[in-house]
Image (cartoon, grey):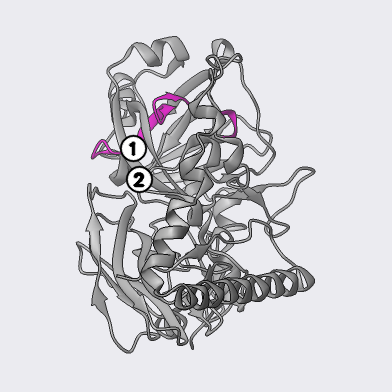
Amino acid sequence: MQTGRLRKAPENFLDRAGIQQVTAQARHGRRDFLRGAFAAAAAGVAAGGGHAQQKENSDGDPNILTLPEHSRGLGQAVATDGYGKPSQHEANVQRRQSPGLTQTAQASVSFAPLQSLFGIVTPSGLHFERHHQGWWDIDPSKHRLMLNGMVKTPKVFTMDELMRLPSVSRFHFIECGANTGMEWGNVAVPTCQYTHGMLSCSEFTGVPLVTLLEMAGADMKNGRFLLAEGADGSSMTRTIPMSLVRSGEVLVAYGQNGEMLRPENGYPLRLVVPGVQGVSWVKYLRRIEVGDQPYATKDETVHYVDLMPDGTHRQYTSIQECKSVVTTPSGGQVLLDKGFYSVSGLAWSGRGKVARVDVSVDGGRNWRQARLQGPVMGKCLTRFSLDWVWDGKPAILQSRATDDTGYVQPTYRQLRAVRGTRSIYHNNAIQSWLVEESGEVKNVQLA
């Protein structure tokens, strides 16, 4: 089986000049590859057979014949700073900032490098960021969580008190409501890091919120909504329906991926609301109030609303609908030769489990069912893959997810028929990547 080669995506947010430069480099690299392959084949013929030349090249590979330094010497000691770091050769795999979205004095968004990740868990240091007033490294000994409103006994918890309670750990995705928002306006950003990178998945550890509410004697019948308030400068406040809390899924979390939360992810305490847009996962959580109606806070009446075709605002949106994206091959990458590739990507649904993912290589005319890699968990990322042999001709790669409620990820035509063209949030339309004859992969949008 002939195996193709893939060049990784450029890791920067490129302007037009940058894209042209990368394109020129990609074409030059492909020419060098083809030129080298032709020369090797010609030399093989001259030597009396391609197989003999292939064996000679293999026998003469200095990376095989000469033991490298790391195989002959003493390696380094344990990490001197006490905390491990990635290899220096992976320095390009990092979160990237964007000039888009709401800005404060500091950059407010960084995108996770989805095209460089494996499996379903996002390393804590690569988890996407969204800040409304910058991040803080809060002293946990001074942090408090208050419960008030429609409760019999208002409570105040210290971190020590919370961490003494029975805990649970669960894997869940978190996606910003504005993820893929630029695509509403036909802005073709170059890589999936920028189209879909406000998405991450972690193992979160904490106390079920329902446990704390029961300790405070919350009115779980008449108290139909909660107000979650953060301790950052923006005083982020969000309404959370009590119906999401009763199941025990909502966590007051202090742990992420086996360690304490990172400061940029809400240390020392954040709310985890599985399946709901990230803005409701309030960071630096300091107060929960029980009420009987939505709170109409600034971040759910002025922000995080969508203008519908009839001129009304779509408010209190929360659930992240079923969605998927091919991450490899994806925008900015280059297929260096024809042959076999494993098309891989991520799928998720805020309503439950991913039941099926179909992949098309011809722009949606024909679909094949992809493999789902286990474990497949509710409100969690699911990795999928499909075998594909590229024949060197133009192709359009797409993925279409279906969840266990029967919901099928829509096309842009289907989504815009309902939502119009003036939205920002909750874009879950099918993503398309054009593979050109040169092997370059670009972001395109099919009407």
Lower sequence index among marks 2 and 1: 1
- For the point 62% across and 77% down, the residue is 31
Q: Which residues are magenta?
A: 246-264
Tell me if 264 is positioned left or right of 428 in this view.
right
Coordinates of residue 325 in the picture (x, y in percent)? 42, 65
Graded by Cα atoms within 10 Å as few (under 14), some (14 to 19) or many (20 or more), the crowding at tag 2 reads many
- Contact? badges 2 and 1 (CB < 8 Å): yes
Indicate whether 389 appears above or below 6. Answer: below
Residue type at numbered disc 1: Val
- For the point 28% across and 46% down, the residue is 243
Residue type at numbered disc 2: Pro
Q: Quadrant of residue 10?
A: bottom right
Graded by Cα atoms within 10 Å as few (under 14), some (14 to 19) or many (20 or more), the crowding at tag 1 reads many
Coordinates of residue 343 in the picture (x, y in percent)? 36, 67
Per the image, the residue denoted by label 1 is: 250
Q: CA distance from mark 2 to mark 1?
A: 7 Å
Coordinates of residue 177 in the picture (x, y in percent)? 50, 57
Name the secondary structure under disc 1.
loop
Tell me if 126 is positioned left or right of 153 in this view.
right
Give residue 274's mark: 2
User: Relative to the observer, which residue lies in front, 174 or 35?
Assistant: 35
User: Relative to the observer, which residue lies in front, 336 or 104?
Assistant: 336
